[in-house]
Structure formats: C-alpha cells, structure tokens
C-alpha cells in the first residue's frame, strides 16, 4: 500500500535540481541566427516548474474533442437500443490527484470506498441510441456524479449504473422510456474489488457489495514502529518474481487492505430500495448471481497476504451460495501463489481434474463446466470415458497432457458431488463453449491432431454432433460479431495454418446477463470473419458473415464488405440477420455506423461523426520498405507536412518499438492484417503531430532476429543495422536531413531510445518515456527475454544503456510517471539514469509527473509533455549544427 502524496513532498526538490541542470545545459547552446526569441522561449519551457503548453497547432490536436464522436456499443437484450457512455474528454489532475492507496497493485480511493479507476475514469453521462433511427435520448444523471458499470435489465426496460460521488458510490436505475433516474441504494457501495453490479432473476432486484454495517474505524499506523519490515524465504524452491511496482510492506498495510476490501453482499429490491444481506461481511472479489436469482457464485480473497506478489496472486476460495448466504458447495480453493510453478499458471489446468469454464446455464437451473476425461490408467476412469480417451503423447506424465479429451458436465442444485450429469464427451480438448438461448443446443470448439472444429450438440440427441466448421490448422473461436480474428502480434490465430482460408468465428449475442449463440429461426448459425490476402496492399482485408445450416452444414454468404471501404459488422438486429449495424470507414472517410438491410444492401446512417483533427488527416503519408545490410526487410511509416514537396529534406524524428522474431517470416506475419482502408486515427500522444511542426516523422517496429530464446543476443547489432537502414533509405528518398535527426519511444521504446544514443552516433536528441535503463534491475526477465540475469549476463549488461552513460551521444529528454505500475519500469530507473548522465556531463533532462501511471493520461501532463518535447527538439534537432556527426557503421 502507498498513499499518493502531493508532488511537492515526493520529488520537487530533486526535480528542481534536474530542471536547473537542464536549464544550465540549454544555456550553453548557441542561439541560431534570427531565432533568438524562439530559442529563449524553448529554454523557458524546458526550465519551467509548472505545467507548460505546446505550440497552438499541437495543443489543438492533443485536446481535440474525439470523445464527441459516437460508436455504438452495449446493445440492449431486445436489440432495440445501444447505450452510450459519454466522456468529458481528457481527465485532469484534480481527479488523478485525489488521495489513494496502493495495496499490492490494487488502487483504492479511500474517501469513496472504491477502486481508483471509478474516480478517475468514470463517464460524464449516458444516452440511448435507437438502433433503427439513430435517435438519441439523454439519460438523466444525478448532479455531481460520474457513471460506471451500466447494465441493462433482462427485459431491456431499465438501466442500472453506479453513480460515483466525491465521497461515495451509489446505485441508480434509469427508465428507458423516460430517461429518468432514481437512487436505489441507501448504504454506499464498497467497489474496491467488485466494481460492477448485476441484475438478479427477472430484474426486480440487483446484486451488489456494500460497505458493511456496522463498520469499525480505519486502522491507524502505530506511532512508533513495532519492528522491521520482514521478508523470509525458507523454501529451496526458486521464485524468480517480476519487479512489481507496488507491494504490501508490513502488518499495518495488510490490515488496511483487509479493511477496504471487506464488504457485504446484498440483494437490493429496485422498487422498495430494501437491501437484504446475503451471508456475512467478507473479502469479496467476485459475485455472479444465477439467472433465476436463487444462487450466487462467490469468490473471496483469503489470507495469508504476501509481500512478494500482488493481490491477484493472493489465495481465493470459490463457492456456491444460496440466496441466504449458506454455502452449498466449494468450487475451488486456490492457495497463495508466490512460486513460479503456481503464480503464472491458469486457475484450472486441463490436467488437474478441476472445473474449467464454469458458468451458469442460460436458461433453467444449474451450471456447466469442462473437465479433462481421466486417462485409462487414471483414478477411477469409467469405461465410457476411458474408451473415448485417445492414446497419450509419448512422455506425458500419467497419461495426461493437452491431448486428453474433455467432457461437458452439467451441475444441478444443491450442487453436491453427485449432482452432475455428463452432457457430452468430446474427442479432443474443448476450448470454446456457448449455448443457444433456450439451452437446447450447445456449441463446442474442439481441437485434435492439428484439426479444429466447431460443432453443435442438441440436448434431445446428445450422442450426435452437427459440424459447423472443420478445418486443418483452424483455431476454433466463438465470440461477439466484432471480436476480430487473427493477425495479432504473437497470437496463435495469426500464425494459424489456415490464416488465409479461415472460416471465421461463431457469432454470439447478449441475452440478459449472459452470452448465447446467434441462432436463426430456421436453425442456422453464423460465422463472422475477415478474409485476408497475401497481397494485402492491393487487396485489403474484407469482413464477411456466412450462414450455416446446423442440420446439413450448408453454407451461404450473407454479407461481405466492399473492396474499397473498411466495413465491420457491429451487431445484428434480429436472429435472421436481416438487418445489422455496420461501421464503415475509408482512408478519407470518418468511421460512422449504419443500419444495413442485408438483402437489399440499403444503408441508413445512424451516427454523424466528423473529422476532429482535419489537419492531422491532411498530412502526407508514405509507406517505405527498408532493407537492412543482412537482407532483412521491414516497414517504416513516414508522415510529412501537408502539401509536402518531393525532395524537401526535413529534420527527422524516429519513433520506434522493437520486437523479437526468429526469422523474416515471423516479422512478415505481423503485417498481414494491415488495412489501407482504415481512417487515420490519432490520440493525444500521436507522435506524427510533429509533422505539423516541420518534421519528417518515421514510426516503425524494427525486428530483432535470432534463434528462439536468444534473440536478444543480437539486440545491439540489430538495433544499429535497423536504424542505419532507415536513415539510408529515407535519405535516399530525400525525406530527411540526416544531420538533424531525433529518436524516441515509450516504455520498451524508451529503453531502445537510450540504447540508440549510446550505441550509435546518428541522433542529435532523444525522447524516452517510462523506460528501464538498467537491466540488472529486472534480473528475472523482461519483454520476451526469458533467461535470467545469471544465465544471460552478457546480454543483460550489453542491453543496459545506463552502463554506457559515458558513451551517450545526443541530448536525452526523459519523462516518467511517478506512479508507474508497469512491471519492470520503476521510476528509480529514470532517476538513476539522470544521475549517471549528469555525472558524465551529458545533456539531459528528466520530468517526473505526479499521479501518472505507465503512460500520461491527464490533460495537464499531456500538454506539458508536448511543450517540452517540441522545445527540446527545436533546440537539439532543428537547431543542430550544420556539421554532421553521423558516420556509417559500415566503415
């Protein structure tokens, strides 16, 4: 736990010294001819100890009202409306600066008894959007409150939401017909671990966690310490934990955390506001009522707590309760996970006999779950299951392993050991499960021997399966229509054997509290997907939806997007897919939602989004393929000022983030989902804004290539080759003045920026945010590096730019959030790097931002960053001496 304090008490003195150091160095830089006033203004911005602002063009782009554009989400169960959470724009330091505790990674607003995110990230309001007309109806919100966790009632007539006031959170319910809201709770919520609410049964009541009554006083830290902070490890088992940002420190912090996570589960009558207690106060971490409202699946945090892992690894007890709070069954008891063999493993492994994918039945009583079928030599395997189990893989202990088949089991009240029925025995591992709304049919995703399949099983004939799709190399997928499929860096679907012929994923829809398969009136289901092409630049990806008849497997296409526009299905408005909401955009057309008639193709525009940053859209964009000296190719996206004239050489700014691969093909796979029909998207930190200031901006993810597990042995040499290749190519094409170059990045990109400045002579300046510069501070691994410091010592040391601070070339600006919670990027890294650079007389500055996490979020911080970035680059890149210090590493 850590109580965030005002900036002045944390770092003002040291920050003042660093800023004065930066100012003294800036003062040594000679003014450019005819630029003395601009240079003086840049110096002033860099040395200011209050928030500064950037040039007006940048400020407009950073604060552009993107939040006013509408995207349709949160469809009502009856599919007649969408619920929009309205944003107030960029958050401010007033909300982020409110006192808050850190409990081993859990951030709590103690004044309001809720997670800090509900204080800093709540919505400004709600509105209803008619799915057929686009008509907008505002929802009345109580004055002085923000909104979190809105939830549709099962009948779509009401919306429950959490209203966050300065010192409490309460439940309100809005009437869809009128938009009027009324309070439901009298006692405030305890929304620290459970940050959402659930409708119970028919929608007459709501399940929530409230502040227990009576409640004692907050624990007080002893005036005098009762002993040392203690960590003891008496087990010979290795425990190479990651470098967590916040951990519990002592018994007082444990007691304080327990106080703020102990709540009372209640069922609140929406009409009378009466709250019925369910069980007693407990450290409730999740609550899930059954659809009929008779039972609750409850998970509680258990002691002991830990000083070496965060709260997500603390012990848990998962149980089934009845409506009075009586425990009917224990689902799982998970111990504290401090050792590597337990801390990072799934909660229920396939081969441990546990209940996986446990969930309530969508209709009727009971639950369902998956479990691995015991191996033939296992404990008490019945003959049917033993016969269904394929031979185990060679070397698999005990006949287990990922090849063992699964069975689908239904668990009925009162949830005793004998209240189970095997619904279906699969021939391989089941990865996906979804039911039809009437629970008459279950759809399963199963993989076996490299072949993936989705099939249906009707409860009326449980021994027969109906194949929906079956394909070699296919990864079964079931999910929402707009879930996307494949192409993610490192994703299994992106590396699938059937990537270019992937049939898609089984479509689902919301049905009250749960998700069910989308089944048409004639007994068909739908596969939504994206058709990718090997020549993706000439043939951009195209979304599609296929209808598949369950009984015969006959397939017909009901939707395919055009070749010259990016079109995504957001949600169907009926089970027969006659009408659906689609999102349409192009490189020059802002994304907007339309109602599409699937038979005629007629479109009705529902939203009226506009380009909020036209000056950004108007920038000149180039896609440049770069070839390294060793023949490896990668893509660089170059952004130039609007109206750029070919051959005009500009000061350059490189923004990059390296990734590791084993070969060229691995890198190439990351490009396959590129869609040139997408509208240019900008966010407050989009580095391409520098093009409005006369820079050529190169944004790229250069590859680091090597054998599996040892890619980083080539990090420094590949970094040099990558950067030199980009410079040479952009110089050849006449985009950049290679004598005036800057480089930058965030997080791992910041780390790589510092490495670029110590291992190459190419850059006049660097910008590095929230980085780690000393790999001995992450001794158990980082990024994709899985060796520890002791087994990969040379690589760790070679990749630590702080150890080469004396070799730094170029002026380095660093920034870091003082409350950075990312694993492995503690602010101490930037502080020590600044100390090292100062000791070596290097030009550097460091800005530590109060209240910020791993990436700036508040309006004040974002504007301040851009103010200092532009000042830094104007002095050290635009104002660089005419004589180049860039030499070729080929010499």
Image: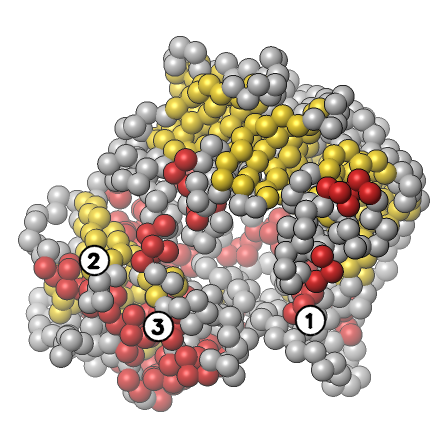
Residue pointed to by mark 3: 715
**Which residue is found at the position 89% from the left and 38% from the top?**
419
Tell me if residue 279 comes above or below residue 337 in the rendering.
above
Depth check, front residue: 630 or 875: 630
| Label 2 neighbour load within 10 Å: few <14, some 14-19, many 20+ | many
**Which residue is found at the position 70% from the left and 26% from the top?**
464
Residue pointed to by mark 2: 626
Find the residue positioned furthest to the bottom. Answer: 839
**Which residue is found at the position 83% from the left and 30% from the top?**
365
Q: Earlier in the sequence, mark 3 or mark 1?
A: 1
**Which residue is found at the position 45% from the left and 54% from the top?**
490
**SS for callout 3:** helix
Residue pointed to by mark 1: 339
Residue 732, x across and y down, in percent: 10, 59
Gap in angstroms between the C-alphas marked 3 and 1? 30 Å
Tell me if residue 536 comes above or below residue 44 in the rendering.
above
């Amino acid at each position: 736990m850590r109580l965030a304090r005002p900036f002045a008490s944390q770092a003002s003195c040291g920050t003042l010294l660093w800023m004065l150091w930066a100012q003294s160095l800036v003062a040594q830089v000679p003014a450019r001819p005819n630029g003395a006033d601009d240079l003086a203004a840049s110096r002033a911005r860099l040395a200011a100890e209050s928030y500064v602002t950037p040039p007006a063009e940048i400020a407009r782009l950073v604060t552009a009202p993107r939040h006013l554009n509408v995207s349709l989400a949160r469809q009502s169960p009856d599919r007649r409306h969408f619920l929009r959470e309205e944003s107030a724009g960029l958050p401010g330091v007033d909300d982020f600066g409110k006192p808050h505790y850190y409990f081993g990674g859990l951030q709590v607003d103690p004044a309001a008894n809720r997670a800090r995110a509900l204080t800093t990230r709540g919505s400004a309001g709600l509105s209803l959007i008619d799915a057929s007309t686009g008509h907008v109806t505002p929802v009345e919100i109580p004055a002085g409150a923000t909104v979190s966790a809105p939830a549709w009632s099962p009948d779509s007539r009401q919306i429950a939401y959490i209203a966050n006031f300065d010192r409490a959170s309460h439940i309100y319910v809005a009437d869809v017909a009128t938009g009027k809201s009324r309070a439901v709770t009298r006692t405030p919520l305890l929304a620290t671990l459970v940050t959402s609410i659930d409708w119970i049964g028919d929608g007459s009541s709501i399940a929530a966690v409230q502040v227990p009554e009576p409640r004692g006083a907050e624990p007080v830290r002893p005036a005098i310490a009762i002993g040392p902070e203690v960590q003891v490890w008496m087990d010979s088992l290795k425990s190479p934990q990651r470098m967590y940002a916040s951990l519990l420190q002592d018994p007082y912090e444990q007691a304080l955390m327990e106080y703020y996570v102990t709540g009372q589960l209640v069922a609140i009558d929406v009409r009378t506001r009466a709250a019925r207690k369910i069980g007693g106060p407990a450290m409730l971490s999740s609550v899930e009522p059954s659809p009929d409202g008779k039972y609750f699946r409850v998970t509680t945090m258990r002691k002991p707590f830990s000083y070496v892992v965060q709260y997500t690894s603390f012990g848990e007890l998962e149980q089934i309760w009845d409506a009075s709070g009586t425990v009917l069954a224990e689902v799982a008891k998970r111990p504290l996970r401090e050792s590597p063999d337990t801390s990072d493993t799934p909660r229920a492994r396939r081969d441990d006999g546990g209940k996986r994918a446990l969930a309530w039945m969508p209709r009727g009583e009971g639950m369902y779950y998956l479990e691995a079928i015991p191996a033939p030599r296992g404990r008490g395997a019945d003959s049917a299951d033993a016969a269904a189990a394929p031979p185990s893989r060679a070397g698999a202990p005990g006949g287990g392993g990922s090849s063992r088949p699964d069975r689908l089991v239904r668990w009925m009240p009162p949830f005793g050991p004998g209240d189970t029925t095997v619904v279906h025995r699969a021939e391989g591992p089941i990865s996906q499960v979804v039911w039809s709304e009437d629970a008459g049919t279950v759809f399963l995703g199963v993989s076996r021997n490299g072949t993936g399949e989705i099939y249906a099983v009707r409860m009326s004939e449980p021994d027969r399966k109906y194949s929906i799709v079956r394909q070699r190399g296919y990864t079964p997928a079931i999910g929402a229509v707009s879930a996307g499929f494949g192409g993610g860096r490192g994703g299994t679907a992106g590396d699938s054997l059937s990537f270019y012929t992937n049939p898609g994923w089984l479509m689902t829809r919301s049905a009250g509290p749960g998700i069910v398969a989308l089944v048409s009136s004639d007994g068909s289901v739908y596969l939504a997907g994206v058709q990718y092409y090997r020549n993706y630049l000439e043939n951009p990806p195209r979304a599609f939806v296929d209808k598949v008849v369950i009984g015969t497997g006959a397939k017909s296409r009901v939707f395919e997007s055009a070749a010259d526009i990016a079109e995504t299905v957001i949600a169907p408005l009926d089970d027969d897919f006659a009408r659906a909401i689609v999102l349409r955009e192009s490189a020059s057309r802002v994304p907007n939602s339309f109602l599409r008639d699937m038979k005629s193709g007629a479109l009705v525009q529902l939203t009226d989004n506009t380009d909020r940053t036209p000056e950004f859209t108007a920038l000149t964009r180039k896609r440049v393929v770069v070839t390294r000296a060793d023949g490896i190719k990668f893509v660089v996206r170059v952004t130039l000022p609007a109206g750029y004239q070919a051959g005009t050489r500009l000061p350059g700014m490189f923004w990059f983030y390296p990734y590791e691969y084993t070969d060229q093909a691995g890198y190439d796979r990351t490009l396959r989902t590129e869609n040139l029909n997408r509208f240019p998207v900008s966010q407050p930190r989009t580095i391409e804004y520098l093009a409005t200031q006369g820079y050529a901006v190169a944004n790229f993810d250069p590859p680091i290539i090597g054998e599996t597990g040892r890619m980083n042995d080539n990090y420094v040499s590949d970094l040099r080759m990558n950067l030199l290749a980009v410079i040479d190519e952009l110089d050849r094409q006449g985009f950049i003045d290679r004598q005036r170059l800057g480089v930058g990045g965030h997080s791992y990109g910041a780390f790589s920026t510092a490495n670029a400045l110590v291992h190459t002579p190419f850059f006049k300046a660097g910008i590095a945010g929230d980085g780690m510069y000393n790999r001995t501070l992450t001794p158990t691994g980082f990024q994709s590096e899985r060796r520890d410091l002791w087994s990969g010592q040379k690589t760790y040391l070679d990749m630590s730019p702080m150890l080469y601070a004396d070799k730094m070339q170029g002026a380095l600006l660093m920034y870091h959030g003082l409350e950075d919670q990312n694993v492995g990027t503690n602010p101490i890294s930037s502080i020590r790097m600044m100390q090292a650079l100062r000791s070596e007389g290097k030009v550097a500055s460091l800005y530590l931002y109060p209240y910020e996490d791993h990436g700036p979020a508040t309006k004040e911080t974002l504007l301040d960053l851009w103010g200092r970035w532009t000042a830094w680059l104007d002095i050290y890149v635009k104002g660089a001496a005419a004589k180049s210090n860039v030499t070729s590493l080929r010499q």
